[in-house]
Amino acid sequence: MSELAVIAIPAFAVLDRLFGADKPAFKGKKAVIAGAALGVGYLAGSWFGMALGALWMVYRALPFFGGSGAPRNMGERLAALLRHLIPLPVAYLAAQQLGGTIDRTLYGFGLYAIAAAGLAIWYGFQALEAEHDGEPIGDQNVLVEAIRGACFGVAMLIALGGR
C-alpha cells in the first residue's frame, strides 16, 4: 500500500459528491470524475487500487432501483442494501486477480455495504419525514454523498492495507 492511500478517503468523498451534484455541470464531467477515480486508485494502490477506482465509477453510475435515491419502503430499502453489496464480489474478484488480500477486501467492502445501505435508509426516513411535513428535504443528500464516498475510501484503504 502506498503512503498516498490515505488520499482515497477525502478524494472519494469529493468525487461522490461531484458525481451526484447538478452543478458544476460541464461537458465531460463524468469522464473527468472517472479519470480522477482511476488516478486516485492507482496512486493509492497500483493496479489493484486502480481497479477499485474503476469499480467505484461503474457502481456509482448504476441507476437506483425505482429511480429514487431515497428508499421509502421496505422493498426499496432491501434494494438499497443489494445495490450497496454490489462492490463486494467485484472487489473480491479484483483482489483475487490482482494480488489483493482477500480477507481485508471482504472486510472493507462488507463494512462499506453496511454503512452505505444504512446511510441510504436513514436518508429515506428523512425524505419521508420531510414529505409528511410538506417541506423540502434540504441539503442532506450532500452530506450522504460525501459520507458514502469517504466510506468507499475507507473500504479501499482497508483492502489495500494488506499489500
Image (cartoon, rainbow, N blue to C red):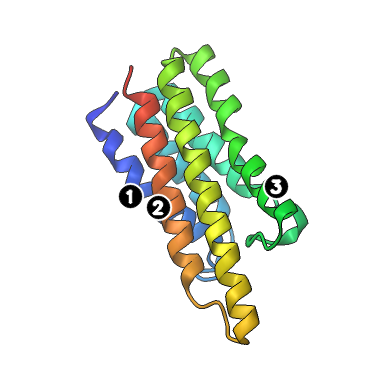
Q: Quick check: can you spot residue 29?
A: no
Most foreground residue, 1 or 42? 1
**Taking 42 as reference, is 99 above or below it?**
above
> Which residue is the site of mark 3?
79
How far separated are the C-alphas under marks 3 and 1? Answer: 27 Å
Looking at the rendered image, the quarter that the C terminus falls into is top left
Q: Label 2 near label 1: C-beta < 8 Å?
A: yes
> Which residue is the site of mark 2?
13
Q: Residues within 10 Å of mark 1 (few under 14, many from 20)?
A: some
SS state under label 2: helix
Q: Amino acid at mark 3?
A: Ala
21 relative to 49 in the view: left or right: right
Q: Residue at x 51, y 47 (%)?
A: 116
> Which residue is the site of mark 1?
10
Q: Label 1 near label 3: C-beta < 8 Å?
A: no
How far separated are the C-alphas under marks 1 and 2? Answer: 5 Å
